[in-house]
Image (cartoon, helix red, strand yellow):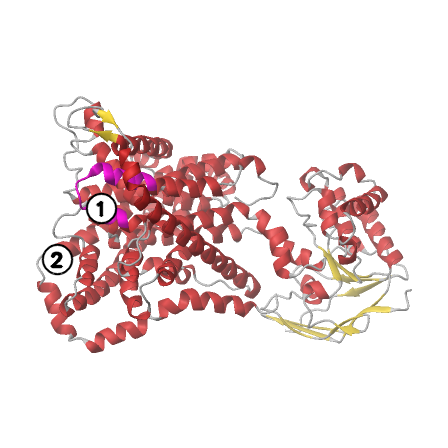
């Protein structure tokens, strides 16, 4: 390749520049406002510390539970890998992508309708009082459950990718040859290595849980809200003090993000220390139970696939049922008039979201490829944390920084989606790309093909699955974007997601279900269209 | 044929980490082979990668490369008219044997009809008794068959220089000798200058004649 630095320049302009904008914006903020006064106002704001603790607690609980559930499911993921059938692994990944594809909001509507105290589940199971009275829109715990359930398939997906890079068979063999049981070797050797490789995705989960806005607005709209929700509300108010509070509040969120990423590192250290201590002595009964807990993990992925189907049915019934009062199991009548009445609004929002997503995913994928090829050409690795920076900085903070540099139109909305879609696409693409034998390209070039022609003819077909997965993930991320669309678009650009959140404060659950269903359908279409056919898988393809 | 210089270099200076190697100017005539002998990890493969235009960026190399009198070290891999066969052959795993070979046809032949291209490639495969494997994927071939297809693919492209990075190392000795002799013979017939690196002392022992010169890789000076 003649000019590898040109590749990095393109990535730097599209992704790096928006990150660099933070520096002048932050210094401008610090110089232009009476910082002490604004901080005092922030601290004295009614419920500030409750908001702060709610945000922090949400992030910590999500990340701890998601880590635990991912690790106890890891052996099942390996069993899939060791089944020796790449198509099997591919299909499983796609069934998780099916859950991943379900937008958070659609997932929240369906789960709340299913498991809330007056929900469908408690109508199906005849109990005097529902077992989970706290699973309601009034309690923060609903937000935690929804976040955990939604982040888990993402972490499985990442764990499977990470496990594919570890020499598991040899490690387990060495462990056995040294007198350790397979379970013991698994937990003491494989799991610490896996946790290390999951550090960045876990930080992504932690920061997302800390700063989530749309889901918090829907699932836990109690007062006071989590801090990220309050920051957006301050920003949407027009008085200068509120805007200053939003700016300083977003800086507080950024500091908290650093804290929760530190927590991810701490839990990794705890796991390492535990593993090292256990290696040198006999196990207690408690430890034996802990080590064997992965048996539970075997069923989790199947439970989640089943749950996705149940939630789909729940959404369909809720969207089309009329006169459905507690404790009736089924509605009095079915009707489709809501589709007819809302068709134009739905189609408009979905159409716009789709085309923005196509543009954003295309740009993101090209940037991913340029990043990977620059790394190959220079034989240097850009630190992964730097590439994924948009995911580690609270989204609200970034968007508030970008607002003065952008305009309220479709172009800037799409542009604001790109860093986030790019980061997720990179998470899906880079680990697979790193397994590609780059000498195939050198070999092809000796036959007279240019670098990019050789890439297209040889590398693209062998990396078809990760390329399509990255593109699909980038599209799904774009479709789900709420804060960038709302704040950069300034209310002038609406998509299905912004329309849906606007509706979520209302009490028309059929309408919410209809929008949730349409969002899910849109994402499902993306996945179905982009799903590589297992039967067409070629020899040597990287999954 | 053998009087024409195809590949030549100026004296070459390699430096990487704690190694420094000075090579004299190299010269390989048409149809001749330069064997480069040396222990594993001494930098022999780096010489090939530099000739090809893909030296690792941690290696500093000073030197000039000429192919048929034209300086090529500023050119891209695609422009150097060099072919390479790696130790692991690297047939494209998703393409059948015939598609691997069709991929390597020179530009002029890619303009022919598909029928003509296939006929040409099948005739070449026939010569190496592999025509019946034309539709097979590389995974269905034995090590020796893969080596022959890999060499054939490199030769089909009609390079002026062929670089061999221990492509026979994984084969047993008798097979290695047969395939190596076949490859050297082919290169000789077609006037291709060949550079082959190896760490096995017997690799050039039976092949040494006036077409094969052997150079010992010098020791690091640091």
- Residue under mark 2: which chain is it in? A
Q: Is residue A509 magenta?
A: yes
Relative to residue B89, is residue A486 drawn left or right? Answer: left
- SS class, disc 2: helix
Q: Is residue A180 visible?
A: no
Q: Are marks 2 and 1 on the same chain?
A: yes
Residue A180 is situated, as x and y percent measured from the top left of the image, at: 43, 37
Label disc, if present, on residue A49 of the rendered structure: 2
* CA distance for labels 2 and 1: 29 Å
Vertical relation: A404 (above or below) A278? below
At x 52%, y 52%, the residue is: A433
At x 37%, y 35%, the residue is: A301
- Residue under mark 1: which chain is it in? A
Magenta stretch in the rendered image: A499-518
Relative depth, front residue between B29 and A191:
B29
Vertical relation: A331 (above or below) B174? above
Residue A71 is situated, as x and y percent measured from the top left of the image, at: 36, 41
At x 65%, y 65%, the residue is: B54
Q: Can you tell which quarter of the image residue B188 is in?
A: bottom right
Mark 2 vs mark 1, foreground winner is 1
Vertical relation: A136 (above or below) B104? above
Residue A121 is situated, as x and y percent measured from the top left of the image, at: 22, 28
Q: Which residue is mark 1?
A: A503
């Amino acid at each position: 390749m003649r000019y590898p630095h040109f590749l990095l320049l393109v990535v730097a302009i599209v992704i790096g520049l928006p990150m660099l904008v933070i520096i002048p914006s932050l210094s401008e903020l610090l110089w232009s406002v009476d910082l002490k006064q604004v901080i005092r106002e922030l601290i004295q704001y009614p419920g500030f510390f409750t908001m702060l603790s709610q945000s922090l607690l949400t992030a910590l609980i999500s990340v701890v539970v998601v880590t635990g559930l991912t690790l106890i499911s890891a052996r099942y993921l390996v069993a899939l890998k060791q089944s020796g059938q790449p198509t099997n692994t591919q299909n499983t990944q796609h069934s998780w992508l099916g859950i991943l594809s379900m937008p958070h909001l659609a997932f929240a509507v369906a789960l709340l309708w299913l498991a809330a105290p007056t929900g469908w589940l408690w109508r199906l199971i005849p109990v005097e009082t529902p077992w989970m009275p706290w699973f309601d829109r009034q309690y923060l715990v609903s937000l935690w459950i929804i976040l955990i359930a939604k982040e888990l398939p993402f972490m499985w997906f990442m764990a499977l990718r990470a496990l594919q890079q570890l020499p598991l068979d040899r490690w387990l063999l060495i462990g056995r040859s040294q007198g350790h049981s397979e379970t013991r070797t698994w937990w003491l050797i494989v799991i610490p290595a896996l946790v290390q490789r999951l550090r960045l995705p876990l930080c992504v989960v932690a920061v997302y849980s800390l700063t989530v806005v749309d889901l918090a607005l829907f699932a836990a709209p109690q007062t006071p809200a989590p801090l990220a929700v309050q920051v957006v509300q301050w920003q949407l108010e027009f008085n200068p003090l509120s805007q200053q509070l939003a700016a300083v509040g977003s800086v507080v969120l950024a500091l908290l993000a650093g804290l929760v990423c530190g927590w991810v590192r701490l839990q990794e250290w705890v796991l390492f220390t535990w593993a090292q201590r256990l290696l040198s002595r006999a196990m207690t009964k408690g430890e034996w139970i802990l080590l064997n807990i992965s048996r539970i993990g075997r069923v989790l992925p199947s439970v989640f696939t089943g749950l996705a189907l149940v939630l789909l049915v729940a959404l369909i019934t809720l969207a089309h049922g009329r006169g459905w009062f507690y404790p009736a199991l089924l509605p009095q009548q079915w009707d489709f008039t809501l589709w007819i009445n809302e068709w134009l609004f739905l189609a408009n929002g979905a159409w716009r979201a789709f085309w923005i997503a196509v543009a954003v995913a295309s740009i993101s994928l090209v940037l991913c490829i340029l990043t990977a090829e620059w790394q190959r050409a220079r034989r240097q690795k850009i630190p992964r944390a730097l590439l994924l920076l948009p995911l580690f900085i609270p989204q609200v903070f970034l968007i508030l920084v970008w607002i003065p540099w952008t305009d309220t139109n479709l172009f800037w909305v799409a542009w604001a989606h790109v860093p986030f879609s790019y980061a997720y696409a990179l998470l899906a693409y880079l680990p697979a790309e790193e397994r590609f034998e780059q000498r195939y390209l050198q070999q092809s070039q000796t036959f007279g093909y240019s670098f990019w022609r050789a890439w297209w003819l040889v590398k693209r077909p062998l990396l078809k699955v990760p390329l399509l997965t990255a593109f699909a993930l980038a599209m799904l991320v774009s479709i789900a974007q709420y804060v960038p669309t709302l704040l950069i678009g300034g209310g002038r650009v609406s998509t299905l997601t912004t329309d849906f959140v606007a509706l979520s404060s209302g009490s028309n659950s059929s309408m919410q279900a209809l929008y949730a269903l349409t969002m899910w359908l849109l994402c499902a279409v993306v996945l179905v269209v982009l799903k590589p056919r297992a039967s067409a898988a070629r020899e040597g393809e990287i999954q | 044929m053998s009087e024409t210089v195809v590949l030549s270099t100026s004296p070459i200076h390699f430096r990487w980490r704690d190694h420094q190697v000075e090579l004299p100017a190299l010269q390989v005539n048409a149809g001749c082979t330069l064997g480069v002998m040396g222990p594993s990890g001494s930098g022999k493969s780096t010489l090939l990668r530099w000739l090809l235009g893909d030296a690792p960026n941690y290696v500093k190399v000073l030197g000039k490369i000429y192919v048929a009198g034209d300086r090529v070290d500023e050119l891209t891999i695609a422009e150097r008219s060099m072919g390479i066969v790696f130790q692991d052959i690297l047939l494209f795993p998703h393409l059948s044997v015939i598609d691997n070979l069709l991929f390597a046809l020179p530009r002029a032949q890619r303009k022919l009809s598909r029928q003509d291209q296939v006929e040409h490639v099948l005739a070449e495969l026939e010569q190496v008794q592999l025509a019946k494997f034309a539709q097979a994927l590389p995974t269905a071939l034995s090590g020796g068959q893969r080596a022959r297809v890999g060499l054939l693919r490199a030769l089909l492209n009609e390079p002026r220089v062929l670089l061999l990075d221990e492509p026979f190392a994984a084969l047993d000795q008798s097979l290695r000798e047969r395939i190596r002799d076949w490859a050297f013979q082919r290169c000789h017939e077609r006037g291709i200058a060949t550079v082959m690196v190896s760490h096995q002392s017997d690799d050039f022992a039976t092949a040494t004649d006036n077409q094969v010169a052997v150079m010992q890789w010098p020791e690091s000076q640091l």
